[in-house]
Each structure stands twice: as C-alpha cells, then as structure tokens.
Amino acid sequence: MSVTRPKGFVAAAGSAAIKGSGESDVTIVATDDARPVSAAGVFTKNKAAAAPVEISRRHLEETGGYAAGVILTSGNANAATGESGRFAARRLCGLVGDELGVSKSEVLICQTGLIGVRFPIETAERHVAAITRTRALGEEADLAAATAIMTTDTVVKTASAEGDGFIVGSIAKGAAMLAPDMATMLALVTTDANCSPQRSGAVLKEAVAGSFNEMTVDGCTSTNDTVILLASGKAERRDEVGEDELFDAVSAVCHSLALQMANDAEGATKVLNVTVTGASSNEEALIAARKVASSLLVKCSANGEDPYWGRVLSELGSAGVDFKIDRVSISYGGVAVCRGGEGVEHDRSKVGAHMAGRVIEIACDIGIGNGEGVVVGTDLGYGYIDENRTTS
Amino acid sequence: MSVTRPKGFVAAAGSAAIKGSGESDVTIVATDDARPVSAAGVFTKNKAAAAPVEISRRHLEETGGYAAGVILTSGNANAATGESGRFAARRLCGLVGDELGVSKSEVLICQTGLIGVRFPIETAERHVAAITRTRALGEEADLAAATAIMTTDTVVKTASAEGDGFIVGSIAKGAAMLAPDMATMLALVTTDANCSPQRSGAVLKEAVAGSFNEMTVDGCTSTNDTVILLASGKAERRDEVGEDELFDAVSAVCHSLALQMANDAEGATKVLNVTVTGASSNEEALIAARKVASSLLVKCSANGEDPYWGRVLSELGSAGVDFKIDRVSISYGGVAVCRGGEGVEHDRSKVGAHMAGRVIEIACDIGIGNGEGVVVGTDLGYGYIDENRTTS
C-alpha cells in the first residue's frame, strides 16, 4: 500500500479520456472524511510553469496550507496553454471539490504529459465526479492511483516509511526531463502524522532538496514538477511530530522514489552514483557531482562500460568549483584509477566487472576541503533518443 | 591555402608515432625566417587544463606575446599527466625551437586526443626535428597541417579571409566536447597583418567570444581548448592594422571554423541555429539560446524532425533569465508555432519540410527587451553515442 497506508486517506483512479488510448489518466487522493488537512507543496522553478502549478500554488496561498484532496492527471501537461489552461485546472479542482463538499481552493492539482497542447476539459469534466466517487482504501486503490499518473514510466512508483507512531506513503511518476530542481515528476506524499502546514512545508522542502534535486537524467527542468505532502493527523499518536522525525520518514520516501525514477529513466541501462568528497563545501561538492553526472561524455562512457576517468576529471575541472588537478583522486567501484590528477596502475578486470553492472559508483575526491555530496544519474544510450525523438 | 596563405608562414606535418596507426599526428607552423612574431592565445577555462595549455600560457608570459612557431599534436591530449606531461610539452617546444634556432619559450604547443594517458615523449621526440625541417609554403603543406591535427573530425577545417592589405588564414580541429567556452578544439590563426601582441590578444579574445563560444554540441568544456593567433607583419601594408578591421577578418575566420565544427559534430545530422530576441540584455539572450541549443530534449526532437516547441519554451523558462510566458513567441524556419506562450495554428507541412532539412532555425522572441543572441547547436542521435561510448 502507498498513499492510503497512512490513516485518513482514500484514492481513486479512472479514465477521463485525456490520453486517447482509453488508459486510466486521472488519480484522485482525498481525506477519508473529506475534511481539509495540512498541505504543502514544492513546485518547479521553471518560469514557464504550467497552469496546474499556478493554480496549486494559489490554492495553498488562499487556504494557508490546507487541502481535502488532490487531482493528478496524465497525458497532457496543460502547460503553455494560457488562460484556457488555467480555466481547465480550476475547473478540475472545482469538480473534485463539489464531490467532496469543499471549495475548489481546498483541492490541489498536478498534471503531466505533452506541453503546449490545449487541455480537453470539455471531455475530461464529464468523468471527474464519477471517478471521485469511487475513492476507496487499500492495495487496489493505491495501485490504480499510482498507475493512472504514469506517462513514459515503465513501472509504478510507490514508497512508504514508518515513523514513531505515524506512517508516510507516496506515489510518483517520472522518467525523463529529470534534473536538479526536480524533474518531469509528480509525487504525492501522504502521512497520518499530526503536523502544521508550516512544519509540513519546511520538511517537504528539505526532503526534496536532498532527494529529487540530487538526481539528474537529462538536465531538463520541467514546467510541471510538483511534490505535495498531505498530513491527516489521524495516526494513533496525537501530539505533533517533531520536524526531524517527520523529515527522516518523508526523506526516506523521497529518496526511494528518486532512485526508482533513476532506475526507470527513459532508455537508461545504468544508474550512476557520483560521489564527490574533499570539496571546499557541501554545496561545491554537489555542483561538481552534478556536473559529472550530467556530462554527456561521462554518460556515453557509462553506456559503453568504458572507465574513461579523464572525462570525469575534465568535468570536475570545468564545474566552477575550487580545484587543483594534482589533488584529485577518482575511483570506479572502489578501485582507484586516478591519484594526484594522474592515472595509476589498477586492476582493469575488476573495474571492467564493475562497469558491466547496472549501478556504477564513481567516487571523486577533490582533496581540498571536507565538502561532500552525491548525485544520482544515468547513462545515455539509444533508448533515450528513441523515447524522445518524436512525440507521436 | 590556409595557414601559409598570409605572408611569412610555413607549415609541416608528419607522424611522430603518437596515434599508433601511423597516421600523421604532428603539425608545425612557423615563421618563414624563424623570427618570433606577435602571438596571442585564448585557452580553456577548465581548471584541469592540460600540460600544453599550461606551457603555452607560460611561454606567452615569458616572451610578452611572441612566438616563432607552434607545434600541434593529435592522438594524446597530454592532459591529467602531471609532471611528466609538462616535461613532454616543454620538450616538444624545445625540439622545434632548436630546429628554428629560437628558445623553447618562443614555441607554443597545442595537443588533442585522449585524456589521462601518459604522452609517449620518448618515441615522439625522435621525429620532431625531421618533421620541422620539411616546413614549406603552399597548398600541400597547408592540407597536411590541417590533416595531422584531426582526431574524430571527418573533414579538414580551414578558413581564410582578406582584410584591407592583409590576409588571415587558419586551420582547426574539433568535433565534440564542444561547448560554450570553446570546445575540444584547437585552432591556429595566422595573419600577415602588422599588429602588436596586445592588439592580437584583444582581437582574438573578442573573436573567440563571438564564434567558438557561441556553439554547443555537448556542453562539455575540454582540458585542451586553445586558439592561437600569430601575426607576421609581412603584408605589403606596413602600418599597424586597426583593431576593428583585424577583428572583422579574424572573426570571419573563427565563425567559419565554428560552423565547420558544428557541421562535423560527432554523429550529428542537424545544425540548430537558435536565435533569441527580446531578452532583457544580449547576455541574457545568449544564456537563453544556449539553454535551448544544449537541451537534450530539444536535440532529440531535432533528430526526430519533431517541431515540439513546448520543450523550447520549457528551456527558456528554466534558463534563469527574465521571462513572462505570455510574451513568448517561437518559430521554426520562420513559421510561428507559439505566440503569447500558447500554440497557434500554423502550416504544418511547411514546418515539416523545414525540419527535414539539415539546418533548423529556431527563433524565440522573449518579448521583454531588446537583447538578442544566436547559438549554434546540433541534434543528438545514435551517432554521438556510437562515437563516444568507448574510446577503444
């Protein structure tokens, strides 16, 4: 179970004919008593933010951080759709709100799919009330909810974690346009913990920074990225949970979802864990790790299972961080291939065996300070191109 | 003719057994009387700069901007090679200097090839003097010089331009690791114009900024990027040429070389001309154009001939520049596909025909100010991956 595992939530899914294929394309997650609960969101920094991002932001402002439900749709991003897009997003919230008996501003919205295509609200609106009415608890509802938000994802993505007397659950989608500052990704995280909108917001922001924002597939920041946290406060434990303990559980869920996305990245055959240590700060370590993990040349080498550390060194040198080439060490799968900025003799068969695996560990020590960071990336192969060269 | 077309230069090329294949891998360009002339260089900003970059920078400092010759080698970048790499680069300069009868600091060096492989100086040094002695004028010498610096290039790259009473010639190599801040590229520009090292330096810097730095293939900044300008002062026109007129000729040559590189980009099937107008400054226009031209998703769409402007809009929105989605227009090949941040009806067959061509014009108007800029990029297809997945 995922989003309905924490107490107080129900989920529904179905087709509103957005995808055209007849597959399910609408998910609704609501509180079981249709009462608004603590809600927080982290949204894309893209200034071409889609209508659902605008509307969800506005609704959270209007309510001061409360929502009774979230509608998530797939197949059309409702991005670059102007006033008609905002109308459609508001209308979808209104339809769910009517069914729950709350105002439309107490409903949030996430959408994913193609950019720049008018959202077919006239068709979609006919289905939303009926889908909302099927909301239920349990495995089946959760799986349906996770499935209906998929676009190019090949597997459903769910995660849950237990805190001390509370539970966190989640569903997510995302397989490309994955970059720092999230991804073309939507994630809905639910918890039965008792916590204020302020605490939810702070925890979510920090958890996203340390998970989705430390993953890169193609360096593209989407128009629709959204992570929402709803906290029902219906766990047996009644006191407000501490920020740290909530963070631990929410962060665990976000980390798991981020890894699931990297593993399901469009056309990827490898996951790259790029660790940078010895940077002058943690921030610089992350910048350097991101530069390596997002390098087309490093990604191509990973695809070809070629431990060409010279490209890793070159990316570190051009990352704009404090750097002295003669202090740099690089290893693949724990085997040092470069020390003091030069190649060193090493066990090539051991490195070759590591490169042949699905997960490639690239560890770089910059040798200057104590900053460290990890960024998860993927290789670049034919599959990514096949997936993205045409939208038809 | 190219580097020896301006008066006062001779060129030579041959094999120093660096490549292993026996192909020519050393080019030497020198003044015809072996006297030092005005020299300037623009080098990679990569902090993991290769030994030849370090040595050339140092030589230019030592001489105050004079050189009698340049040695360019291919097949081994002599990067990430520590003290032995610096020794090798100095040694190569010394061998050419001995042959020309000048000090080693009056010889500059450019190298390109694999990073992190010890440079085979013991073998190479046996061939350099003999190659230097074959230096000559004319077509054949120029072609040999341009050929010996190629790595993954499929065609030789040369360009020349005429100023008022002076000539500029050039050879270059570069086919990937092409990014703002130059590329894995080497270019040697010669001119018979009379101009001081200071003027040469200023002109070269500006010409590089407007040509090589406005081209992107894969966003990678190499360890070895170098552009050198030698000015013999042997044109019939004896007075020092003005900065503007020298800039025009040097810039024309650099532009031509940059386009040749984009056209020969590893595995590319399309050249993308991304123009941004209406930005709040020229600088922001270039930032936005670079973001679009280097987007993996935009590049994949170009490969698939898919005019998916939503991705262009998304990149503009995440470029970090002043941006209001409802002011943005985008066109492909002059046909508007997006206005006011929304799709507009357009002639799809006309756009389709444009996308099928080799050069794709993507014009974006941000609608905020008067800033404009152009960045040249390429598509992303199987070819790039084939070229880069393994070095063997």
Image (tube, coloured by chain):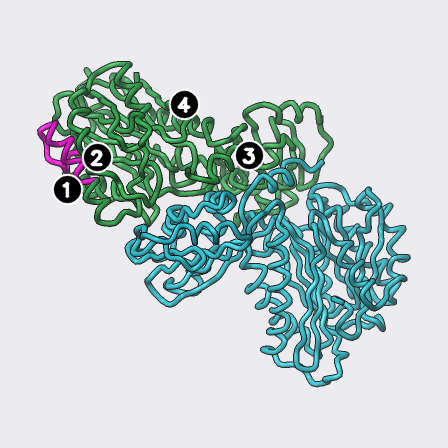
Chain colours: A green, B cyan
Check the picture and name the quadrant holding the C terminus of chain B: top right
The answer to whether residue B371 is magenta is no
What residue appears at the point 50 percent right and 31 percent down from the top-left corner?
A267
The stretch of residues the image draws in magenta is A89-107
Chain bearing mark 1: A
Among the two numbered marks 1 and 4 on one chain, the one whose residue lies closer to the N terminus: 1
The x, y position of residue B225, in whole percent, is: 65, 55
Q: Say few, some or many: other residues with alpha carbon within 10 Å of mark 3 (under 14 / 14 to 19 / 20 or more).
A: some
Check the picture and name the quadrant holding the N terminus of chain B: bottom right
Looking at the rendered structure, the kind of residue marked 4 is Val
Looking at the rendered structure, the kind of residue marked 2 is Thr
Q: Which label lies toward us, 1 or 4? A: 4
The residue tagged 4 is A155
The residue tagged 2 is A123
The residue tagged 1 is A62
Closer to us: B313 or B288: B313
Q: Say few, some or many: other residues with alpha carbon within 10 Å of mark 1 (under 14 / 14 to 19 / 20 or more).
A: few
